[in-house]
Amino acid sequence: MIEIDNITKHFGNKAVIQNVNFKVEKGETVGLFGPTGAGKTTLIRVLTAYMLPSSGKLTILGYNILSHSHEIRRRVGYLPQGVSLYGDMTVENYLTFVARLHRVRNRYQRVCQVIEEFQLTNQAKTLIGKLPPDLHRRVGLAQAVVFNPEILILDQPTAGLAPDQIIEIYQFIKPLTDQYTVLLSTHTWCDAEAFCDRVLVIDKGRIIGEKCLKPSKKWIEPRKAAEAGAISILAEALFISIKPIAR
Amino acid sequence: MNALVVAKREFETFLVSPTAYLIGAFFLFITGIVFSFNIVVYERATLAPVFETAGVSLIFFIPILMSHLLVREFQRGTLELLMTSPVAMWEIVLGKFLAAFLFLMVILAPTVAYLFILIYYGQPDLPVIWVGYLGLLLFGGLVISLVVLSSAMCTSQLTAIILSITLAAFFWLIGRLDSVINGEVGTILAYLSSQHHFLDFVVGIMTLSNITYFITMIVGVLYLTTHILKMRL
């Protein structure tokens, strides 16, 4: 569903993403795991057609990002980092607005359904700007799925939330990973473990390792980790993932 | 067309903004004073002085009222979600423009009351007045497009207001240079002047050249805005 072939993204002379390659198959939940500044958000912005890659080939659902970005945007639901929504709109109006942009049929029913799904019924008429962070995040998730996308991209869905809010938001993200093909970025190993079938470890703009989290799948050896000079983050990832088994 | 969806959202934001009504009321207060003065002192059944005052006022009122259009999208980070939806950049720009233009019509709508007062007490030249309104809308459209351009270029609302007032004033005053600069350059400057074209509408002169000027300028500025937005991402 997602094929990334040697993608590089430059900001001026600085390469923020360097020669990234990976594939995401239908139904998979793949995590992009790495520290702050690793290039996760930039890579995700390239994947959502918000930014164009400087070089390389990116195909999503068979569409090339350079020639068919509009088609890709129609089919990809996105929760950005920080989830900036229109605070001056009510939850219901905002979801209807997103549904309109995506030309959703039976808009009213779908919006009601999503509001119910994300337990936002009591907040449907509330201004988004007045919602606490966890509900704000739920509205962000609701807008990402209101048009029934084929792929869901979540950029640090739990960042900035309190522990109890994280536990709560997990309940809403988990069913989505069963329903959609999901790519999510995180710098918290708990997120990766909770949701992902497979994790790609990213540091300094490069994928330095890849690991399967589903018990049924084989572990994959780290790729060029030493070369990227960021073995520590991968080691951390492996350590944390082994921890539950050691117990 | 998604430009209309964007326009609807933006227009609803104007409708619930107390600042927008406050500025709109102040605009009506100024034009109301000019209208009263024209009726009581000069006893003329015309809206020309109102249109002239409204034209100059719009150079200041529109930027103050509308310069948040794209600046706020950048500041709040909402442009990212909009840009990852199936909306083309030109649709966002056009949507913002349409919403602002529609709200300008809302602000101008109460001034039609002046027309009814004129009809009640005198015999105004109605076609001249309608042409004046058309001129005011076209000129307002030009100022709005300059505001949208400025808001795409600036990172703060204040700088967007200053830039858009400067640009609108520049196009308003540039025609004055034709008295200093002679020849073809002077003629070109006079043609580029929005004041020159607008004042024709105010006195009831509606020519293809005047309409073409405003439409070309508006489309050109919005096209430039789209490219600037693309460059900023």
Image (cartoon, coloured by chain):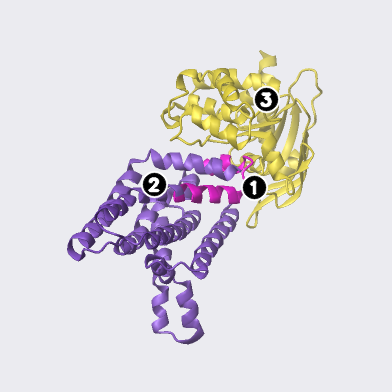
Chain colours: A yellow, B purple
The residue to which callout 3 is attached is A239
x, y percentage for residue A203? 67, 40
Q: Is residue B27 magenta?
A: no
Q: Chain of mark 3?
A: A
Farthest residue, direction top: A247
First reached walking from the N terminus: tag 1 or tag 3 = 1
Residue closest to the eye, B73 or B128? B128
Q: Are marks 3 and 2 on the same chain?
A: no
- Residue lying at 18% horizontally and 60% vertically, measured from the top left: B40
Task: Relative to B54, say whether A75 is above or below.
Answer: above
Quadrant where the N terminus of chain B lies? Answer: top right
x, y percentage for residue B215? 53, 62
Q: Nearer the viewer, mark 1 or mark 3?
A: 1
Residue closest to the eye, B84 or A195? B84
Farthest residue, direction bottom: B183
Q: Chain of mark 2?
A: B
The residue to which callout 2 is attached is B106
Q: Nearer the viewer, mark 3 or mark 2?
A: 2
Q: From which residue to which does the magenta span run?
A: B78-101
Relative horizontal placement of residue B75, taking residue A193 as reference (left or right): left
Q: Between marks 3 and 2, how big is the CA–CA gap?
A: 63 Å
Q: Are marks 2 and 1 on the same chain?
A: no
Q: Between marks 2 and 1, how big is the CA–CA gap?
A: 37 Å
Task: Relative to A171, say whether B42 is above or below.
Answer: below
- Residue lying at 68% horizontally and 15% vertically, measured from the top left: A246
The amino acid marked with disc number 2 is Val
The amino acid marked with disc number 1 is Met
Task: Relative to A217, say whether A90 is above or below.
Answer: below
Could one spot residue A35 in this view of the protein?
no
